[in-house]
Image (spheres, helix red, strand yellow):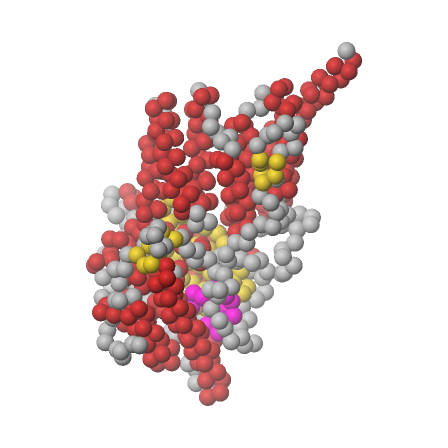
Amino acid sequence: MVKMESTEEQDRKLVLEFCHLLEKSKQLFNGLRDLPQYGHRQWQAYFGRTFDVYTKLWKFQQQHRLVLDSKYGLKRWQIGEIASKIGQLYYHYYLRTSETNYLNEAYQFYAAIRGRAYYSRAAKEDRPDLMVKKLRYYARFIVVCLLLKKMKLVRELVTELEKQIQEYTNTYEPEDHMEWSLVLEEIKGFIKAEAAVAVLHADSNPIILSHRLSPLTTPPCERSPHMTLSLQEILIVGSACEQAKFSELTMDMFRMLQTLEREPTESATNPLSMSHGMHGHDASPAASRIPPYGVPGSKGYLENGRHYRDNPHKYLLYKPSISQLLVFLASGFKELPLGGALLLYMSADGCFSTTKHPEDYGYELGGLATSVKRDSVDGGGLSCRGKSYKENHCLYPGDLYPFTRRPMFIIIDSDNSFVFQHIPRYFGQPLVILMSPQDVPPAFQADVQHHGSLFTLFLHSPLTALCYICNVGDVPIHHWERCQTYVDRFITEASRLVTRCRIDEIEQGIGFIDSSYVQFFGDDFLRTLILRFVFCDVVLRLHRGFRGRHMRPRCEPQLPANELLEHPSLSHIIFQLASALDVRGHFSEGPECD
């Protein structure tokens, strides 16, 4: 009898401990939304405590599952909810650190929820709030799979989400059914827009290619002592009104964030391990994965033995207010280490000035719309020439002057991009500004407005962009790989020419290329962007459909024409590539290609 009471007492204590950990985990998780999104030190310690509690909670429910099943009534959806919270922790930690390995960890937990059907009985609980949790789980899982380019799984999840939304609507007739229908339409539109050009297997099934940076895709570079800067802080801002989006990621943001990340590595640990319960419970993500790399700022955290991160730290801002944008810019500016550079990428509709004789290039030429909503300007569209916006909805070139005290790399993708070419270098720091074409041929205007900018597509995947403007909708994989060799040759040759310009400048005293490009050129990401910009400029200059200076990109400081942008060796490679794709007719006359 005493032994029985002792066992019951132990079970009661186990249940109380579980309840304590569960409540503590909820409190810490709910507190995450109150943390500042910018700065590093303000949130690292809190994330560390949250990871610690979830580590204990996950291990505890694994070790004592039998008791929790019988004495607490632990349900499978409750285990799924814990796993979902851990997945969210990893995803948000990825957003704050830009380390793609954490994205893989989020995927492991989300995949386990689906694989073990933790939410399978959610509809039978007669709780609409539980169904909403299940729908949110699907939406989050889809975002993670999109970022990891698991498109086959994305399509499966969208089909499942559609069925779940239908069941939720039929069962509860909820007030938010229209919102969920909109979520579904957004993701379908996003998937359609993302597939600009299809690369096909021999059996005509599409192949999903990654466009993150890898050792094989990093452009070569002849190093010099002048290449001193490393990209450390990034702001990616998406404010284009009509562009396809999902979960506060516009298509341009989606493409650019991948361009500025290295290919994630597979975790060395086994992603799943058997539970420690007494009977054959399902496989669950191992407790050792929480967190596998440690939390920065906590004991035992190693950053791969290096001072710098594998990926630069970045902020993602969807239609921010001008005050939010400037605060995040200031935070990135503050966090820059010695030898670090800040990159600002903005994809936005233009704010156009009505000033006939501008004298202040910082504020009288217009700028970029930030958080203006469609219905807030005359009840109509965002970007109409001749209309001006209120000052607090517009980022002007002059707003960026204070931030040029540190090395800065700016990419502007807008129909009013050229107004940023006049930013002065008051402080003598390296400054490069890449500006998109302000116009595209009429045949592309509707698609580009919704499916994502052509300029950003060139920076993300040069070959995809070239196929797109030549109306090549699909390419067999063997043909794609052959064409990619021409792109690689172009990038290698352009890199050689940039280095050659610098050597000529030193030896002959002729300033062929601004020193800012040379200082940025040592960074893998910035070098990639510069060389893809050159590819974009050469292709559009030679393409018959892009006539007029507004249909070509610009940069400041200007890159040399004869020695780089109009160099015969680069034009020759583009003509060869066009012939390989059988689209030579889209390009101006040039030498016959082998």
Instruction: Please give the name of the residue rendered at 24% of the width and 56% of the height, measured from the top-left corner.
Output: 445
Vertical side of 447 occupied by 79: above or below: above
Number of marks in the rendered image: 0
Q: Residue furthest right?
A: 2
Whether residue 449 can be seen here: yes
Q: Main secondary structure of the magenta part?
A: helix
Instruction: Please give the name of the residue rendered at 77% of the width and 11% of the height, measured from the top-left corner.
Output: 1
Q: Please state which of residues 20 and 467 is positioned toward the viewer in this rendering.
A: 467
Residue 521 drawn in magenta: yes
Q: Please state which of residues 479 and 154 is positioned toward the viewer in this rendering.
A: 479
For the record, the magenta segment spans: 516-530
Query: Is 586 left, or right, of 335 in this rendering?
Result: left
Whether residue 129 can be seen here: no
Vertical side of 166 occupied by 401: above or below: below
Which quarter of the figure has residue 32? top right
Vertical side of 486 occupied by 475: above or below: above
Point out residue 132 in the picture as x, y percentages from the top left corner. Answer: 43, 29
Instruction: Please give the name of the residue rendered at 55% of the width and 24% of the height, measured from the top-left corner.
Output: 75
Point out residue 420 in the picture as x, y percentages from the top left corner. Answer: 36, 64
Residue 490 drawn in magenta: no
Point out residue 77 in the picture as x, y percentages from the top left corner. Answer: 52, 28
Q: Residue furthest top?
A: 1
Q: Residue furthest front?
A: 203
Q: Please state which of residues 70 and 508 is positioned toward the viewer in this rendering.
A: 70
Q: Please state which of residues 515 and 48 is positioned toward the viewer in this rendering.
A: 48
Image quarter in which the C terminus is found: bottom left
Query: Is 571 left, or right, of 283 in this rendering?
Result: left
